[in-house]
Amino acid sequence: MSIADRIAAPPLAGATDTLAREPEPATAVPSISFPVAGGERELRLDLFRGLALWLIFIDHLPPNLLTWFTIRNYGFSDATEIFIFISGYTAAFVYGRAMLEAGFVVATARILRRAWQIYVAHVFLFTIFLAEISYVATSFENPLYTEEMGIMDFLKQPDVTIVQALLLRFRPVNMDVLPLYIVLMLFLPLILWLMKWKADVTLALSALLYAVTWEYDLYLSAYPNGYWAFNPFAWQLLFVFGAWCALGGAKRMSQILSSNVTLWLSVAYLLFAFCVTMTWYFPQLGHLMPRRLAQWMYPIDKTDLDVLRFTHFLALAAVTVRFLPRDWPGLRSPWLRPLILCGQHSLEIFCLGVFLAFAGHFVLAEISGGAAMHLVVSISGILIMWAVAWVISWYKHSADKTASRKKDAVGNADMAGGG
C-alpha cells in the first residue's frame, strides 16, 4: 500500500434516452464528439481502459520508479475510477442498443451471459491465484506470501473459504475489482430499463442511493470480517454516470464541456488535488495545509468513493475530452496501439495483470529488490500484457476471416446450385 493509500483510504478490516445518430448543432464553441451507435469503434475508450489496466498493474507492485507515473500520486482518484466509468459507458452503449432493438428480455439475457463470463473468469482467477501463491510459499518456505496476499483464512478453513469465495465474500489481495463489476452488471438491465424511461431521473436515483449509502453506512460484508474494498452501493454512481453519458448525457453536456469556465474550474481543482497529495509525500509541506481543511477532507475514502475522488475524476474527464477529440490522429499511432489492444481485451488482460503482479512480488522478494529490478519487472509485465493482447486480437481476427470465407463459400455454392 502506498503512502497515498494509507492517507486517502481508511484501513480495511481483514485486509438514453436515445442511441440514434444526431446531427451536431451549429455553435460557435468547439464541439465535443462522443461515440454514437455506428459501426466505428471508439478508440479513446479502448486507449484509457488499456491505460487503466497498466496503471492498476503498476500500482499492485511494490512502490518503484514507475509508481510515480501513476495518477494516484498526483490527485485523489486513480485507475479504478477510469476502469469503472468506461465499463459503465461501454456496457450501456452495447446492451442499451440491444435493448432498443431486441427488447428487454433479450438484452437482459445477453447481459446476464456477460456477467456469468466475468464470474467464471473471477473463479478461474481465484483458483489459479491461490495455487500460484501456495506453490511459491511452500517451495520457498516463506509463509509471508500467504499472509501478504490475504489467503491465510483459506489455508486454515479451505472448505468454508471456497464457498465464501464463490459468494464473492472472500477475495485475496488485488482481486476486488471483478466482484464489483459483476454486481454492477447484474443490475445493468434495471439501469437500462430506467434510462429508457427517464435517463436523468435514473442518474438522480443513483446519486440518491450514493447519498443514502454515506448517511446510513450501507455496505456489503466480507469474509472473514470487514466489508468490500469497493462498496457497490457507492461505486454504482460512477458506473451509472458512465451509462448515462453513453445514452445521450454526454451529448447534452457538450456545450458545458466546451465552456472555458468548465475548463478552468477543472484545472483549478486538479491543481488543488495535486498540492494536497504532495503534502502526503513531503511532510515538510504539511504546514501549508490548513487544519480545518484537513479535518474536513480526511479521510478521502476509496471504499465508499469519496466525493472528492468522484469530482477529481470528473475534472480529469472534462480536461481529457476537451483536448483529446474523437478524431485525434494519434489514436491511429502505432505507439498507442499496445494500450488500445489491451483495452480491447480488458477482462483477459486484467486477470493476467493479477498473476503478473504477484510474480513481480516474488521476483523482487527472492532475487533483488533494487530499483533496476523494479524497472525490469514493471516493463516486462507491461510487455507481456501487450503481447498477450496482440495474440488474442490476432486469433480473433483470423477466426473472423475464416468464418467469413466459409460463409462466402456456402453462399457461392448455394448460388451455383440455384443456377
Image (spheres, rainbow, N blue to C red):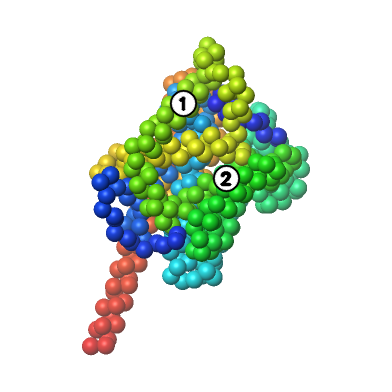
Q: Position of residue 195 (x, y in %)?
A: 50, 60
Residue at (59, 57) in percent of width and height: 186
Task: Name the amino acid type tagged 2.
Answer: Trp
Residue 132, placed above or below residue 188: above
- Residue under label 1: 272
Q: Nearer the viewer, residue 145 or 225?
A: 225
Instruction: Name the spot of residue 199 as percent of width and height, x first.
Output: 49, 58
Q: Residue at x 47, y 53 (%)?
A: 244
Secondary structure beneath disc 2?
A: helix
* On screen, residue 369 above or below 146: above
Q: Residue furthest bottom?
A: 419
Q: Nearer the viewer, residue 109 or 272?
A: 272
Question: Observer-nearest residue: 241 or 43?
Answer: 241
Q: Looking at the figure, which quarter contains the N terminus?
A: top right
154 horizontally vs 318: left or right: right
Residue that numbered label 2 is attached to:
235
Q: At 68% across and 38% down in the image, what residue appears?
A: 151
Q: Would you identify the image quadrant in which residue 171 lies?
A: top right
- Residue 59's spot in the image, x, y percent? 51, 32
Look at the image and tell me whether residue 294 can be seen.
yes
* Picture residue at 27% right of the left edge, 49% below the top: 27
Visible residue check, residue 397: no
For badge 1, the amino acid type reads Phe
- Provide residue 276's location: percent of width, then percent of height: 51, 23
User: Number of marks in the image?
Assistant: 2
Q: Secondary structure at mark 1?
A: helix
